[in-house]
Amino acid sequence: MAFTYFFRDLQTLNVVRDYALPYLKTKRYIDIWDAGCASGQEPYSLSMILNESMGHMLFRNVRILATDIDESNLFSGIIKEGSYLKDQVQRIPKEIFERYFVADQTSGRYQLKDEIKRSVSFHKHDLLSLSPPGKDFGLVVCKNVLLHFTEEQRILVLEMFYEALAEGGFLVMEQTQKLPQELKGKFEPLLSNAQLYRKK
């Protein structure tokens, strides 16, 4: 199972909130693709960040499609249940944790509240198929995945993200991942200290 945890790379999540959310809020539905979601900590972290920054009525329009190749066949069930062990939730800021998680005394696990679970759905998907699971996304999030690909594969996957994005949509990547030179004409960099791009 991929190594990840809630609120990993909080700086990037805050960049999405501060720079992409104003655009996303203009849409009837806020469609987001989280590519390479592992067992759900990243899309659920993003969902909580968005919920903190939006009114209840608007947040109901958030639809995060979380995808992963899921070779273990475990992620779908974990994400659907939104249930995590104590050591998996320890890094969550205290006020966020108390607002969105409920302890299950029987299992000793911590359960996400329904308002957050409803915003995320899971679909098994291989990025190297180069066939996106949807289109017209306002935001594509892809972190900790591209580094496992060759440079040629990275370019092809990023081209797929470009095609899957709505006009003016955003792409955000891990800080260590740089946009290949071949794609400079398709994405506009927005910040010098974060890998946030807008579709040209």
Image (spheres, helix red, strand yellow):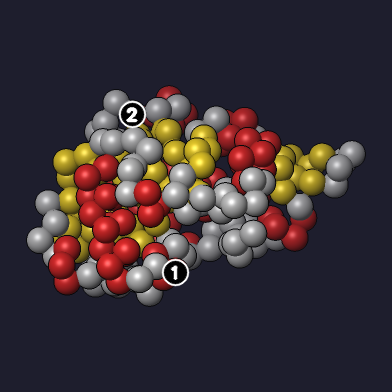
Whether tag 2 and tag 1 are in contact, CB under 8 A, the answer is: no
Residue 183: horizontal and vertical position, in percent? 17, 63
Q: Identify the amino acid type marked 1.
A: His
Give the residue at mark 1.
148
Q: Is residue 108 left or right of residue 31?
A: right
Identity of the residue drawn at 69% across and 55% down = 89
**Left or right of 75: which side holds 87?**
right
Quarter of the image with the N terminus is bottom right
In front: mark 2 or mark 1? 1
The answer to whether residue 9 is left or right of residue 161 is right
- Residue bearing the label numbered 2: 29
Q: Residue 158: x percent and y percent? A: 27, 57
- Point 56% across, 36% down: residue: 116
Viewer-side residue, 199 vs 160: 160
Q: Which mark is residue 31?
A: none
Number of other residues with Cα within 10 Å of mark 2, as a class: few under 14, some 14 to 19, many 20 or more? some
Query: Residue 64 sits in which quadrant?
Result: top left
Residue drawn at (47%, 54%) of the image = 36
Q: Crowding at label 1, few (<14), some or many (≥20) Cα neighbours within 10 Å?
A: few
Q: Position of residue 67 (x, y in %)?
A: 48, 45
The vertical placement of 181 against 139, above or below, is below
SS at circle 1: helix
Q: Secondary structure at mark 2?
A: loop
Who comes first in sequence, dot 2 or dot 1?
A: 2
Kind of residue at badge 2? Tyr
Marks 2 and 1, Cα distance to the nearest angstrom? Answer: 32 Å
Q: Which residue is at a point 26% across and 31% down the rendered structure image?
A: 27
Q: Quadrant of residue 23?
A: top left
